[in-house]
Amino acid sequence: MRKSLRVGQDRGPQSVYGKQKGSFVILTLNADSKTAGRLLGQFSVSQHISWDQKYPGSKPVVWQMLQLVIANFLLAFILAGLAVLGGILIALSRRVAGKWLPDWEWGNPDGETLTTLKLR
């Protein structure tokens, strides 16, 4: 990559400067060496793994789990309420359709429709 992009070579306005930190490659385009050096100097990569690091939050884990359970119950209650509301709206729409649009199939239950055959 250094050879194909000519990284670190001063080519005027088309200069490319870069560096590698860990698995990251940082490139600056169209900058002079002084500006690119300052910009590349600001980036740093650090890796830290700890198995016994304490949770940084202020709430205890039990309280967080309780909040999660309450939120799930609230979500289930909202979904059940929306299902009941949808059923009520469907029932009301059938009644309104039966009253205002009697010829329409939606307003007449299956047993109340009359089929006539004009046979001669």
Image (spheres, helix red, strand yellow):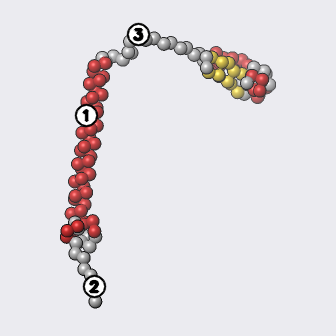
Q: Position of 30 compared to 89: left or right?
A: right
| Residue 31 in picture, x, y percent from top left | 72, 24
The answer to whether marks 3 and 2 mark residues whose Cβ atoms lie closer than 8 Å is no
Amino acid type indicated by mark 3: Asp
Helix or strand or loop: what does disc 2 sit on? Answer: loop
Q: Which residue is mark 1?
A: 73
> In the rendered view, would you say 105 is above or below 3?
below
Residue 44 makes an appearance in the image: yes
Identity of the residue drawn at 21% across and 63% down: 95
Q: Position of 52 compared to 8: left or right?
A: left
Q: Nearer the viewer, residue 116 or 79?
A: 116
Q: Could you tell which of marks 3 and 2 lies nearer the N-terminus?
A: 3
Q: Quadrant of the C terminus?
A: bottom left
Q: Which residue is mark 2?
A: 118
Q: Quadrant of the N terminus?
A: top right
Q: Is label 3 or label 2 in front? A: 2
> In the rendered view, would you say 21 is above or below 112?
above
Amino acid type indicated by mark 1: Phe
Separation (CA) of disc 2 from disc 1 = 58 Å
Separation (CA) of disc 3 from disc 2 = 86 Å
